[in-house]
Amino acid sequence: MTQVTREHWASRTGFLLASIGSAAGLGNIWRFSYVAGENGGASFLLVYVLCVLFIGLPIVIAEISIGRAAQGDAVLAFRSARPDRPWFVAGGLAVAGCFFILGFYGVIAGWALKYFVAALSGELWQAPQHNHYFKDFLAQPLAPVIWQFLMMAVTTGVVACGVQRGIEAVNRWLMPVLAAIVAVLAAYALTLDGAAKGLNFLFAPDWSALRHPQIYVAAIGQAFFSLGIGMAIFLTYGSYLARSQRVPSAAALIVVGDTLLAVVAGLAIFPAVFSFGLNPAEGPELAFITLPSLFALMPAGHWFGTLFFGLLVGAALTSMFSIMEVPVAYFMRRTGRSRRAVTLSLGAVIFLVGVPASLGYSILATITIAGRNILELYDFGVANFLLPLGGIATALFTGWGWGRIRALPGADLHDNATGKIWLFCLRFIAPMFIAIAFFSNSMVLD
Ligand code: PFF
């Protein structure tokens, strides 16, 4: 039988855009704004940036390196790096985790699409009260499921076209468009009357807030979610990278791109929130209730709002491709079936995994644990348990399992200060801080 050659990115830029697209998603806009809003803004941002630098970046480098070395999916990559140890379980966890992540992610992406279309058609601006608008939308059993289906269908369609012709091709034009939209939104928000208050909130830390342990736990969880680490996403994208492409500089660009996108989205959101005297600590509903009512009042707010939800949809999509690619790569190898067949079946399964989360506001609303409905449980479980677990596994594997001798050259690093710091972060810093966050979250759930 002829060996089918593995797909590869057409260019380094394509890989970088797809990876930044993967990292930058609902996490940077929908989640970052409400988590930063709830945790004091600037003090949170400070801790967040430290988490990204000392935990996020080392893990992104590790993931890309493991994938590039193996030129294979999550399970194969861990297995080929250490055939003698059961590290492949970490790959299996990632593949399984992606079903849940994409399941609920697709639901929120569906809300974003609904809001984008409603903003375009004008329906959103006629709603007298946006909290009712949102709650009425979610209380319908069918509508949220249909919007979720549409987002999953687009994702499935693009991923089915392949790494170069689907994922890379779409990211190549969509990412520059999204960057331009977020820049325009921020530039406009900064001209509003209350912009200074928004800037203060985001950049002038209240040092006393650093005494609250919650801020650290929230920052680690957000760093994991926003970068999308621990679930073999960068590992899988890295497996389509030619061995000649250098990893550390690519990882640094991805991490900087992701953080910039969150901060610039914050620059679009907080000045506007403060200009209209609203509360930034509204929780997950910030993007869907607080912001639309604000857009309705703001000069040129309809344009602003339409662009904002367009940005949310585009950012969500480029992330959905990457989450989907993890199980697609695995099942293509395991079943030997074509990309198209595997993607279609997985798209259907993942859609179904998400349906209960969609229905958690209507017919399944009575199912709650510790006050959280099904979607909130998915979100909480993913950010606070699944990703940290995957993150610890990746860090420990690279730091200890793969070992200095193989890991350093595997990541294009050397036995110098940079290489030592990288290994130290993976061996000690990341596992320790993730474990602390993990256990404090277990206590929150009780
Ligand atoms: N990093 C992306 C985001 O911030 O939305 C996508 C993502 C991947 C979210 C993996 C969550 C996750 F577990």
Image (cartoon, rainbow, N blue to C red):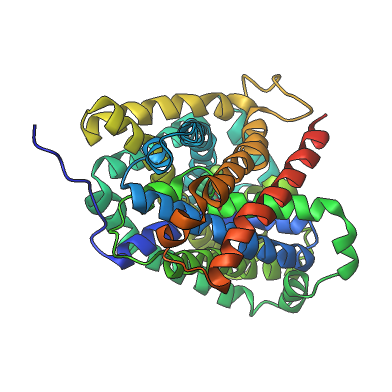
Residue 286, can we see it?
no
Residue 145, can we see it?
yes
Q: Is residue 139 left or right of residue 112?
A: right
Query: At which x and y percent is residue 324?
Result: 40, 39
Query: At which x and y percent is residue 160?
Result: 26, 40
The N terminus lies in quadrant: top left
Q: Is residue 255 left or right of residue 321?
A: right
Query: At which x and y percent is residue 87?
Result: 49, 36
Compared with 179, 125 (above or below) is above
The C terminus lies in quadrant: top right
Q: Could you tell me which residue is drawn at 62 percent across and 19 percent down? A: 363
Most extreme residue toward the left is 1
Q: Is residue 163 left or right of residue 350?
A: left
Query: At which x and y percent is residue 175?
Result: 39, 63
Query: Could you say which quadrant of the image residue 381 lies in?
Result: top right
Compared with 180, 72 (above or below) is above
Q: Could you tell me which residue is drawn at 82 percent across and 50 percent down? A: 214
State the residue in front, 423 or 388: 423
State the residue in front, 38 or 194: 38
